[in-house]
Amino acid sequence: MRDQLSERDGLRAAAEQVADLAGKRAGAAEAERRLHPEVVRAVLDAGFARHFVPARWGGDAGTFTEVSRAVAAIGESCASTAWYASLTAGLGRMAAYLPAAGQAELWRDGPDPLIVGALMPLGEATPSDGGWRLTGRWPYVSAIEFSDWALVCAMVRTDGGPQARFFAVPRAAYTIEDTWFTVGMRATGSNTLVLDDVRVSAEMSFTRDVLTVGTAAEADAPCHRVPLKAANGLGFAAPILGTATGALKVWTSWIAEKVRTAPANGITGGPGYDAVLARSAAEIDAARLLLDRVAAVVDGGPVGALETARNGRDCAFAVDLLVGAVDRLFRAAGTRAQADGNALQRAWRDANAAASHVVLQFDPAAAAYAAQAWHRP
C-alpha cells in the first residue's frame, strides 16, 4: 500500500484505504476479539509503525498532527483498528528513548516492527551481569498477538529508592494469556503479556524519567523532544474522535431517510432530530478543534509545564464531548441501533469503553491544569 502512494499523499491518504478494509472486517473482528491479519498488515504498510521512528533507522520522524488525523480517519470505520494504529505509532516514538545500541537492535530489519506496550510498572527487574532479569504480568496489551516487540515498564531497586524503567523485549521472550473479554473495544485483543525471569541487556532499557521529560537519546526531531504527558492523551483521544465522527455519519444517514419518508409512515420529525444533529455535530467539531490544538502545540515545541497540563485537560474534555455526542445519537436512533452487529451500537460501546482510559479522566487532568495555572506546588 505504501509503495502505491506518493510522498504528497501522506499518512492520511493511506489511512483512508485502511479504514475501508477495517470497516468491512469490523463486525467479524469484534466477534473474534482480534483484528484480522490483513488489517494489521495494512496499518503497518500504511506507515503507522514507522511514523515516529528516527530517520536514521528509516523512519519518518513525523508529526502528531498527521498521525492523529490519520488515526481519526480510521476510527470512523473501526475504533479498534484506530486504537491499534495509534498505539503502534506512539510506541515507535517511545522506543526512540532507548540507547542508540538498543535502537539499532530493535530496528535492525527496518522501521516497521509492530511494537506493543504497557506503561504501568507492573513488573520487577533486578540487575544481572550488566543487564537485567525481568519478571511480571502486564494486562491490556493491545494487538499483542501480532507483535514483534514489547515495551514494558517495571520497577527496579536502586540506592536512591525504587525506579521505574522501560524494557524492550522480543516476541520470543514473552507469552500471552487470553484475558480480553469486554463490552467494548473487543477487536483490540488487549490480552495479558507475561515475562518469567527473562534477561534483558542494558541497551534495551531506559528510565521512565527520560520519557516523562522528553529527552530521547540523540534526539534529532521535534517529536522526540516532547514530554509524555503533553502528547499521551492525544493518542487515546484520536480514535474516539473518529468513532464519534463515524457514528454521526451513520445516524445522519438513517434519520435523513426516515424523515424523507415521513409522510408515508406518519413520522413528523421524531424526538428533536434537528437539535440532536446540531448539538452532536457541534460537540464533535469542538473536540476536533481542541485535539488539533494539542497536536499543534506538541509539533511546535518546546512544550512547557502549563501547556503540558492544558493538553491533558483538552484531551480529557474533548473526549467528554465526544462520548456525550455518541450517547445522544444512540438514544435518538431508536430500536434499530440496538441490534447486534449494528454499527451505531458498536460505536457507542467502543467510545464509552475507550473513554475509560486513565489518561482521559477529566478530574485529574483538571487538577493538574489548575496546579499550573495557579502556580500551586
Image (cartoon, rainbow, N blue to C red):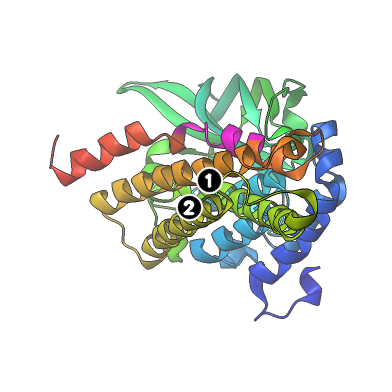
Direction from residue 46 to residue 28 in the image, left or right: right
Q: Residue at point 36% right, 50% down?
A: 311
Q: Residue at point 50% right, 61% down?
A: 64
Give whichever of 344, 82 is nearer the camera.
344
Image location (x, y in percent) of residue 128: 55, 23
Question: Closer to the camera: disc 1 or disc 2?
Answer: 2
Residue type indicated by callout 1: Ala
Image location (x, y in percent) of residue 173: 73, 29
Name the element at disc 2.
helix
Q: Which residues are magenta?
A: 349-358
Residue position marked by numbered label 2 in the rendering: 279
Q: Are marks 1 and 2 in contact (CB under 8 Å)?
A: yes
Image location (x, y in percent) of residue 309: 30, 46
Direction from residue 321 to residue 261 in the image, left or right: right
Magenta residue check for 348 = no
Q: Is residue 293 above or below residue 327?
A: below
Residue position marked by numbered label 1 in the rendering: 325
Q: Residue at point 57% right, 62% down?
A: 69
Give neighbour class at mark 1: few <14, some 14-19, many 20+ (Cα, 10 Å). Answer: many
Report the quarter where the N terminus lies: bottom right
Direction from residue 296 to residue 91 in the image, left or right: right
Q: Residue at point 46% right, 46% down?
A: 321
Name the element at disc 1.
helix
Q: Is residue 195 above or below residue 264?
A: above
Q: Is residue 201 visible?
A: no
Residue type indicated by callout 2: Arg
Report the quarter where the C terminus lies: top left
